């Protein structure tokens, strides 16, 4: 299956201090795997390997703010619409069989069989990522332009839907039958349109998270229920 991703170049429109990215060109899988294994738990460093290059990124406060907020949005909408969803956080997906690896800002299972498989692994306290299926939905916060081909990694993992937020605009992309991501107007999982999301991240008052979540749920019930 081809995993070539074609999209126009994007410039960063938010503050550059949201992230610091370093590219290690022509890196080996062994180097990537060794580097990841040496990172401490809950490290602010995120890595990606696209089969050729390794990207090392240090997250900043702006990045983490949007990641947490978009994750809360996804869970609030899914809960209000009665959509079964299993969050899998920032799991690092190391897949030696295809020599690809990445850590999403947030990722989720929505396929019932995958949810059951992940919960079974968790019940056994299995920490090896090899025991977990690849997620169905991934969130990428790209305040700056990625240096590695991150989308091709998600495509190689077969992740059905990708949400990319650059600090102002949300893009929703679905994996097509040719293994390429195509931008779509609406999420295939949560019914929400891409253009409906950014205001909840940038324009709404988030000083009280509980109140913000209640407003998101009320909006989802009114605007999305029954679609």
Image (cartoon, rainbow, N blue to C red):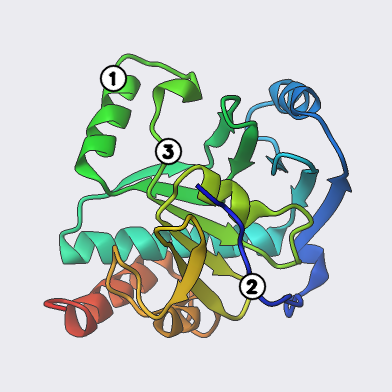
Looking at the rendered image, the disc whose residue lies closer to the viewer, 3 or 1, is 3
| Closer to us: 222 or 131 | 131
Q: Position of residue 104 (x, y in %)?
A: 56, 48
Q: Sequence-wise, which precedes: disc 2 or disc 3?
A: 2
Q: Mark 3 points at which residue?
A: 134
| Closer to us: 156 or 199 | 156
Q: Name the residue under label 1.
A: 123
Looking at the rendered image, the disc whose residue lies closer to the viewer, 2 or 3, is 2
Q: Sequence-wise, which precedes: disc 3 or disc 1?
A: 1
Q: How far apart are marks 3 and 1 (CA)?
A: 18 Å
| Residue 219 location, quadrant | bottom left
Q: Is 21 located above or below residue 36 in the figure?
A: below
Q: Is 19 located above or below residue 86 in the figure?
A: below
Q: Is 57 located above or below residue 68 in the figure?
A: above
Residue under the image location 44 percent in, 70 percent down: 208
Residue under the image location 34 percent in, 68 percent down: 213
Q: Mark 2 points at which residue?
A: 7
Q: Is residue 207 visible?
A: no
Q: Where is residue 114 in the image (x, y as percent from the top left)?
A: 28, 37
Residue under the image location 60 percent in, 25 percent down: 96
Q: Position of residue 15 (x, y in %)?
A: 78, 74
Position of 69 with respect to 12 (left or right) is left
Q: Is residue 61 visible?
A: yes
């Amino acid at each position: 299956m081809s995993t070539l991703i074609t999209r126009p170049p994007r410039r960063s429109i938010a503050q550059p201090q949201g992230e610091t990215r370093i590219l290690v060109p022509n890196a080996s899988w062994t180097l990537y795997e060794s580097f990841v294994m040496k990172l401490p738990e809950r490290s602010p460093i995120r890595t990606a390997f696209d089969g050729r290059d390794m990207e090392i990124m240090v997250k900043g406060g702006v990045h983490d703010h949007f990641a947490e907020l978009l994750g809360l949005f996804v869970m609030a909408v899914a809960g209000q619409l009665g959509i079964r969803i299993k969050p899998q956080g920032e799991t690092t997906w190391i897949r030696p069989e295809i020599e690809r690896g990445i850590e999403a800002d947030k990722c989720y299972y929505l396929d019932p069989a995958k949810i059951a498989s992940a919960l079974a692994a968790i019940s056994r306290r299995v920490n090896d990522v090899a025991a977990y299926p690849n997620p169905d939905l991934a969130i990428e916060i790209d305040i700056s332009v990625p240096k590695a081909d991150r989308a091709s990694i998600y495509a190689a993992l077969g992740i059905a839907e990708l949400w990319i937020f650059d600090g102002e605009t949300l893009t929703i992309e679905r994996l097509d039958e040719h293994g390429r991501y195509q931008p779509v107007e609406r999420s295939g999982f949560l019914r929400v349109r891409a253009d409906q999301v950014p205001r909840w991240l940038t324009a709404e008052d988030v000083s009280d998270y509980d109140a913000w979540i209640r407003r998101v749920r009320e909006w989802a019930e009114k605007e999305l229920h029954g679609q």
